[in-house]
Image (tube, grey):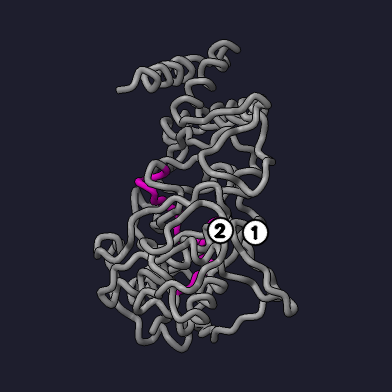
Amino acid sequence: MNLKWLFLIFIYKSYVESTEKLSKTQEDDLFEVYLEMFNISFDSHHRQIFSYSLSDDSLTSKKNAKKYFLQTFYSIEKHNRRFQNGKETFRQAIHQFAHFSRKEFLKYRTGLAKPSNVFNSLSNNNATITNMSKSMRLTYPEYFNWVDRGIVRPVRNQGLCGACYAFAALAAVEGQMGLQGNNAKLSEQEVIDCATHEIEFERIFLGCKGGDDTAVYNFAKMHKGVTSEYAYPYQMRVNRCNTNRSKVHGSTVRSYVKLPVNEEYIKEVLFLHGPLYASFHASDAFTAYSNGIFTDPNGDCYGEKSNHAALLVGWGSEHGLDYWILKNSYDTWWGEGGYFRIARGYNLCNIASDVSYPIIN
């Protein structure tokens, strides 16, 4: 094991076993180890340096980064002590964006934007429980996960780009393709570069500033599919749009279905129709999620709008607590190998408020 990791573990244990705050020297050492572990560096002006360019230089200074990191550290340790005492249902962990402010995290690591006046060229088949559920009265297993069926592509990393919408919606398209035996990987970069919202006769390119599932479905219809990830690889930033590359066979979206806010019904549709796009509110507690069943312990989701999207792939129950399983776009180091579980049954963090799946050709 790396000596830096051992040192960090030592600091963790020293703090957990003590009721006192770390000394300033320990805090300084902890922050420097954190920066080295995640290869985070700052220039002579104390601005963070990245291996790829961002659209602006608004990220916090090193001084503020340390402040945010320590706030995150103490919050996580307080939460995890409660977890160890059986008072929480999930564990948290330090992650490589623990030094971000809340505003920065939302800007660069989420990406859901749903303007109310967007023109939609696709037909929306709003599913209703009354006209469909009679044919769906089946017995469902206690645990189910589409990952086990081999149709869910590997976890991806959106990087510092507000593009969760592209990852989640394309993953839903890929799920439909997988059901037809097509395991091709679609290009999020093409969607980020080229997909738009049409608002009052004006085209607004989505890029890394956020979008939603309908924008992605519209794009896959208008351009008769999506290019492969191999031909149009992800760059974690907006590039010049190029829609002239050949499209993956079977990736054209013909229509889509929006589901009602009913988690039992969503469970049925998930089982019968494949993985689903789902948006929700990603709170501070969620960003530090490591493993277990997320339950929004601080009530941060209450009354908040959705700001993130992921792929709903399954469900289960543990110690009497029902949960959903979702694939995130934060890479495999985050959560449970890139996945997370969230409490099921009471629309926690709006998890059942905006769920859809595409209908492909």
Q: Which residue carries the number 2 mark?
A: 239
Image coordinates for residue 210, horizontal then vertical, percent? 61, 60
| SS at mark 1 in the image | loop
Q: Residue at x 47, y 62 (%)?
A: 188
Q: Amino acid at mark 2?
A: Asn
Please say whether residue 347 is visible from this viewpoint.
Answer: no
Left or right of residue 148, residue 60 in this image: right
Image coordinates for residue 247, horizontal then vertical, percent? 40, 75
**Quadrant into which the N terminus falls:** top left
345 vs 238, nearest the viewer: 238
Disc 1 packing (10 Å; few <14; some 14–19; many ≥20): some
Q: Is residue 62 above or below residue 189?
A: above
N-terminal of the pair, mark 1 or mark 2, is: 2
Q: Is residue 51 above or below residue 132?
A: above
| CA distance separating discs 1 and 2 | 29 Å
Q: Residue at x 54, y 86 (%)?
A: 123
Q: Amino acid at mark 1?
A: Lys
352 vs 181, nearest the viewer: 181
| Residue 226: in magenta span | no
Q: Residue at x 45, y 81 (%)?
A: 224
Of badges 1 and 2, the one in the foreground is 2
Q: Which residue carries the number 1 mark?
A: 305
Left or right of residue 27, residue 13 in this image: left
Image coordinates for residue 80, horizontal then vertical, percent? 46, 31
Which range is magenta? 334-357
Image coordinates for residue 163, horizontal then vertical, percent? 54, 57
Please say whether residue 309 is visible from this viewpoint.
Answer: yes
